[in-house]
Amino acid sequence: MAGTTNESTAPTVKLQKALADAGLGSRRTIEKWIAAGRVRVDGELATLGDRVSSAQRVELDGKLVSRRVHSDPRMLLMNKAAGVEVTRKSVTDRRTVFAQLPSLKSGRWISIGRLDVGTTGLLLFTNNGELANKLMHPSTNLDREYAVRVRTLLDEEKLERLTRGVVLDGVTCRFSDIQYYDGRGSNHWYHVCLMEGRNREVRRLFESQGILVSRLKRVRFGPFIAPSFVPAGRVVEIHTDEVNAVCEMLGLTMRARSRGDTKPTSGNRSVLIPYPNLTLPRWYRD
């Protein structure tokens, strides 16, 4: 059976955690790889629930996996442009977000959730699978905020439906908050919040009320905001103080090592905003 070892006393961890700790992807992504038969342990096909020790050979798509744990978490923030895919290899020859990221000596960048090709705005990346898993897991209760442009004003009945819940493909989806932001003529902007970001959920919720979304931008993910000092299409590395503040908020013991980034991401402005259980860096300025 995959996941066993002759050294019964050797400490083991769940296979998806071992691969996430090595920076290969989030736990949920790796679970999909295991279910699809892409992972082998000591030459045998792995199954969900397998545990592995450091002495065992793990392969992904036939290639040996380096099991070195990435204890030094790093994070990137991108202001995603329209027309760019959140995938490692596009099947349509579009540009991909990963082509724009700096290279790593080992491991890989993991996207914290996804945005569809037409959606712009805040997109986060990390090299650490455990951090990625915490940020994306529903139990962490991090909300996502989007700016939405539509061609008409929503009446009270539609607003009430969108916050009460709409069944989409058998699942009840809803906005935890929806507020009118600005607009004139046929352009009206709303800001909406979701507790999870299912595939095209914002667009589909509006479409359920007969309303087409003409522009969609993610402006916040939990305490992270899309700052004005990061132009569309650009990527910045998040300061170690900010990464460590988020790790502490999430209850993680890992800490980012200083890379000589003694100054914040831009001036003394943070990419974080006040948020429950978050201690902002001492140089933070609103």
Image: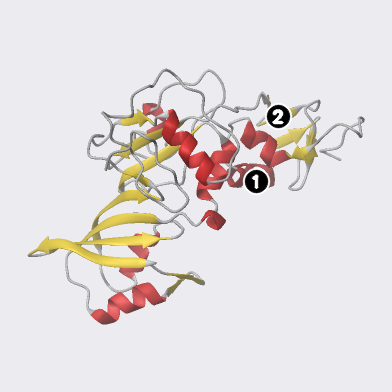
Please report the residue visible at 55 percent of the width from the left and 46 percent of the height from the top.
Answer: 134
The N terminus - image quarter: top right
Residue where numbered disc 1 is placed: 31
**Mark 1 or mark 2, which has the lower sequence index?**
1
Q: Is residue 19 left or right of residue 9?
A: left
Farthest residue to the bottom: give it: 157
Q: Is residue 55 above or below residue 244?
A: above
Of residues 182 and 165, the one nearer the viewer is 182
| Crowd tier of the residue under label 2, counting other residues whose Cα lies within 10 Å: few below 14, some 14–19, many 20 or above | some
Residue where numbered disc 2 is placed: 59
Please report the residue visible at 34 percent of the width from the left and 43 percent of the height from the top.
Answer: 122
Quarter of the rendering containing residue 18: top right
Position of residue 48 measured from the top left corner of the image (x, y, whole percent): 73, 47
Q: In this view, does 91 lie to the left or right of 182?
A: right
**Residue 104 in view, yes or no:** yes
> Looking at numbered disc 1 in the image, what kind of residue is underneath it?
Glu
Quarter of the rendering containing residue 92: top left
Q: Is mark 1 on a helix, strand or loop?
A: helix
Please report the residue visible at 41 percent of the width from the left and 69 percent of the height from the top.
Answer: 174
